[in-house]
Image (cartoon, helix red, strand yellow):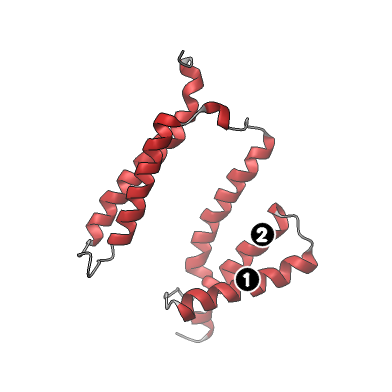
């Protein structure tokens, strides 16, 4: 027995993820794929987008709506988290990695984890420095300097 049409709403997320994966594959191929022995900048995004398409296709056909929790007011926390990520992306370019990451970690610790301020501030600062050391120093990922470039007169 099939579900009534209005109950197929749970199929929207896999469809959206499938569309996102297809768009990601198209965009990554524009970056240049290279070869397996010398991958181009689009190789890793292509692989990730391809895996996203596979996962979305599986969810589209085998997902059961009974696996989902009902939407409540508490579900808005997820939307707030996504919105904060969008704000983080914009702040990242203007404030730089360290300051934007400290603000993001502090926001998530305080609002979503309900940590007290005496734990939030040191964790956000230490966490952003640790992430900076991991990505910028150890992995050599270049980040925008943000406010640090302005302070240094660059």
- Can see residue 134? yes
The answer, for residue 147, to whether it is visible in the render is: no
Give the residue displayed 49% in from the left and 60% down from the top: 89
Q: Secondary structure at mark 1?
A: helix
Mark seen at residue 107: 2
Residue 72 position in % (x across, y down): 66, 33
Residue at x 57%, y 67% (from the top left corner): 100
Residue 144 — which label?
A: none
Which residue is located at x 51 percent, y 86 percent?
152
Label at residue 127: 1
Residue 50 pos. (x, y %): 32, 49
Indicate whether 14 appears above or below 152: above
- Residue 127 vs 9, above or below: the answer is below
Give the foreground label among 2 and 1. 1
Residue 82 at x, y percent in the picture? 55, 49
Circle 2: is it few (<14), some (14-19), or many (20+) Cα within 10 Å?
some
**Percent x, y of residue 83:** 56, 50
In this view of the protein, which residue sits in the foreground, 134 or 81? 134
Q: Count every numbered label the image shows and give the total.
A: 2
User: Which corner quadrant holds the C terminus?
Assistant: bottom left
């Amino acid at each position: 027995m099939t579900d009534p049409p209005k109950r197929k709403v749970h199929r929207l997320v896999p469809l959206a993820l499938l569309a996102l994966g297809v768009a990601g594959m198209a965009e990554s191929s524009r970056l240049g794929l290279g070869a397996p022995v010398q991958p181009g900048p689009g190789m890793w995004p292509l692989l990730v987008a391809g895996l996203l398409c596979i996962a979305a296709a599986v969810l589209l056909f085998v997902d059961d709506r009974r696996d989902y929790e009902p939407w409540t007011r508490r579900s808005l926390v997820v939307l707030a988290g996504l919105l904060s990520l969008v704000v983080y992306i914009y702040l990242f370019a203007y404030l730089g990695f360290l300051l934007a990451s400290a603000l993001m970690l502090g926001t998530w610790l305080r609002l979503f984890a309900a940590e007290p301020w005496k734990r939030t501030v040191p964790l956000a600062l230490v966490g952003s420095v640790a992430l900076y050391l991991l990505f910028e120093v150890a992995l050599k990922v270049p980040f925008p300097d943000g406010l640090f470039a302005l302070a240094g007169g660059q």
